Image (cartoon, grey):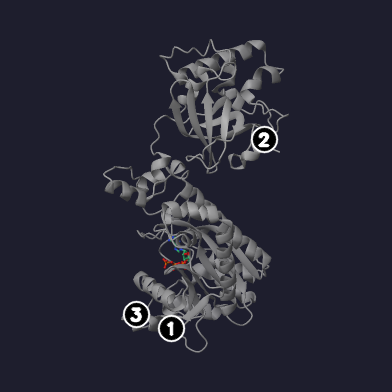
Amino acid sequence: MSTSESQEPTLSSEGSETKSKKASKKEAAKLEKQRRREVAAATSATSTLSVEDDPLAVNYGIVPLIELQSKTPANVNDWTRVEALNDSLENKQVLIRGRAQAIRPVGKKMAFLVIRENGFTVQCLVQAQPDLVSPQMVKFAAALSRESIVDVEGVVSIPAAPIKGATQQIEIQVRKLYCVSKAIPTLPINIEDAARSEVEIEKAIQAGEQLVRVNQDTRLNFRVLDLRTPANQGIFRIQSQVGNVFRQFLLAESFVEIHTPKLIAGSSEGGAAVFRLDYKGQPACLAQSPQLHKQMSICGDFGRVFEIGPVFRAEDSFTHRHLCEFTGLDVEMEIKKHYFEVMDVVDKLFVAMFDTLNTKCKKDLEAVANQYPFEPLKYLPNTLRLTYEEGIQMLKEVGVEIEPFGDLNTEAERKLGQLVLEKYGTEFYILHRYPLAVRPFYTMPCYDNPNYSNSFDVFIRGEEIISGAQRIHVPEFLEERAQACGIEVKTISAYIDSFRYGVPPHGGFGVGLERVVMLFCGLNNIRKTSLYPRDPLRIAP
Ligand code: ATP
């Protein structure tokens, strides 16, 4: 029980004098004097209401630092979550902690506060009343800066009319109010502005009104404020659920979670797009995928492995879908006969993931859609599989030509996504049997035509989220393919040698976490789904 009538919540600032036996009376008096001085400063220099003379001054103020240095142990159950505030608590005393999202003084005797915690908000009324709430306390409340962290203690009441500006349909009649952490009075971005949708801005423009539009760079410069918007709270809770389903699903399917090194000697896959660094005098780089080590773990007899970890790409890709650091969701597994076994895992894993997001993240998806409107993803219970050749044929029929054994460019991928949606009613599908020439050197060629490979890409709304394949597990063949692709074999000898000690046929795939969230939510930029994005122009905050 977070709230009870008999057990009155205690606030550390109030308890300092009585609870700390060691604190001398002198020290306590000094602290109280300092606290009152700070309260007086926080209200107004011109105030005629003196905090020093207020017999109720103990009920409000700025919590002194010493109290926040873990001086007094507290029972966290004394605090009620804002989300849990409902009419069953009528007339009960509650203590909450949250941000002062809105502060609205009404004359000198009343101030409304809206307190936000984890996206839930509650209206609180600070009203001057003899022996309970002093006018000085109302003034203190009115002078709080927005986004400050406050502790509010008060009695729950049920308002006669519905409350429009808060999620919880109760009101707290404030008895005590303490500021735990003060936000600066003028924030670089207002949360209200950052939370506004384009639709609202456009509507306002048409009505001759001017509303602030916060651009992407400003948002990212002040990301901690930007992250407080309902849409961003939703995005990163959805992201957390994607990682969670990925992990839980694979663990249940007997996969082992591994952690491969991110510091790699030479260059990880022989590519140029790596971040080079000096490793104690040796040339090294940041891993551009866990590819080689996850395969080596199959050689090490783990059978089925997965990893969730950072992936570094140095190429100068100034697009809406490329980052220089992203979170890779990687899988590698033994296969008995066919690379379709890997595609079966993709199919079941992602259908389970989408089902979970749709059932468990309803509120988060709604929050995202309120600011960035999108249609729910259309997907089938059994994921559609098309061969590359079938895809090319569909494009050909509408006049889009792809060069023989060439890759699909972004535009062709989008177009194919549209055609697949029209024909099969899904925005999630697998395209497999790609030309060998457009895949990495370790991809297994098809048994019946070496121009094609046992590989696949997976698409959401016409954009790639996954690449996968059966790998070449025969060392001599792997050497041959590496050479053919212009890779210096000796730089990857440890990888190739791993296959000389016997290894089962295997395959796997790599997913970009930020891309999955971006495309599931129909967002237009991967920077929106990366907590602190790194791109060719940004490495901070
Ligand atoms: P693309 O063709 O989109 O550049 P890729 O073929 O280089 O991707 P892989 O190297 O096969 O992709 O990586 C597997 C997955 O990792 C991709 O499907 C994508 O989801 C994600 N990914 C790849 N590169 C990036 C990047 N620069 N930023 C964010 N995610 C990426």
Front-most of 27 and 313? 27
Helix, strand, or loop for circle 1? helix
Helix, strand, or loop for circle 3? loop
Label 1 vs label 2, nearer the camera: 2
Mark 2 belongs to which amino acid? Answer: Val
Picture coordinates of residue 48 (x, y %)? Answer: 44, 12
**Pointer 1 residue:** 390
Q: Ligand 1 is located in which of the four quadrants?
A: bottom left
Mark 1 belongs to which amino acid? Answer: Glu
Work out whether mark 3 precedes mark 2 in sequence or the reverse, and give the earlier one: 2
Is residue 280 among what the camera can see?
no
- On residue 335, the disc is none
Residue placed furthest toward the bottom: 448
Front-most of 43 and 221? 43
**Pointer 2 residue:** 76
* Position above or below: 240 against 110: below
Is residue 109 among what the camera can see?
yes
Front-most of 450 and 482? 450
Left or right of 170, for residue 423: left
- The quarter of the rendered structure image containing the N terminus is top right
- The quadrant holding residue 17 is top right
Q: Residue at x 43, y 44 (%)?
A: 226
Helix, strand, or loop for circle 2? helix
Front-most of 168 and 75? 168
Establish whether ligand 1 lies closer than 8 Å to the Cβ of label 1: no
Label 1 vs label 3, nearer the camera: 1
Work out whether mark 1 precedes mark 3 in sequence or the reverse, and give the earlier one: 1
Picture coordinates of residue 31 (x, y %)? Answer: 58, 16
Left or right of 431, for residue 407: left
**Pointer 3 residue:** 402
